[in-house]
Image: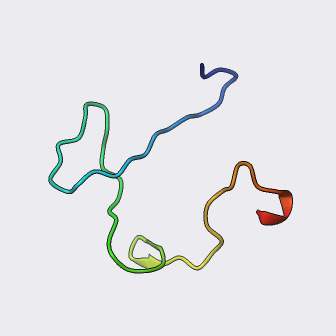
Amino acid sequence: MFAGGEDHALAACFPPEAELPDGWRRIGRVHDGSGVTVDGRSRDAPGGWESFGSATSR
C-alpha cells in the first residue's frame, strides 16, 4: 500500500513498435552505445540511486 505522501512511478522499456498500455506514455529511447545523454548532450555525473547501499556508496 502506498501511503504517507510518497510519490511512486513506474518506468518500463517497450519495443518501438509496441502499442503502449492505457495510461502510459513514451518519455525517452534506449539506444546501443555507452554513456548517458540528456536532450542530446552527454551527461557526465554520478548515476542512479542505490536504495540499500551504504552511505559511502552514494
Pinpoint residue 55: horizontal percent, then vertical percent.
85, 58
Q: Is residue 37 above or below residue 8?
A: below
Q: Is residue 9 above or below residue 49?
A: above
Closer to us: 27 or 33: 33
Closer to the camera in the image, 54 or 47 = 54
Identify the residue at horizontal 32%, vertical 62% (top origin): 29
Quadrant containing the N terminus is top right
Q: Who's the residue at 60% across and 22% down the image? A: 2
Relative image position of residue 20 (x, y in whole percent): 23, 41
Give how far across and how far down residue 15 sits, in percent.
Answer: 23, 55
* For residue 35, side relative to residue 13 (left or right): right
Spot occupied by residue 54 in the image (x, y as percentages of width and height) = 82, 57
Colouring used for the render: rainbow
Quarter location, residue 24 = top left
**Residue drawn where x is 30% and y is 50% of the image:** 26
> How many numbered markers are drawn?
0
On screen, residue 57 versus residue 48, left or right, reads: right
Which of the image's four quarters has the C terminus? bottom right
Compared across the picture, whether 35 is left or right of 24 comes to right
In this rendering, the answer to whether 19 lies above or below 35 is above
Quadrant of the rendered image containing residue 25: top left
What residue is rendered at 14% in x and 53% in y? 17
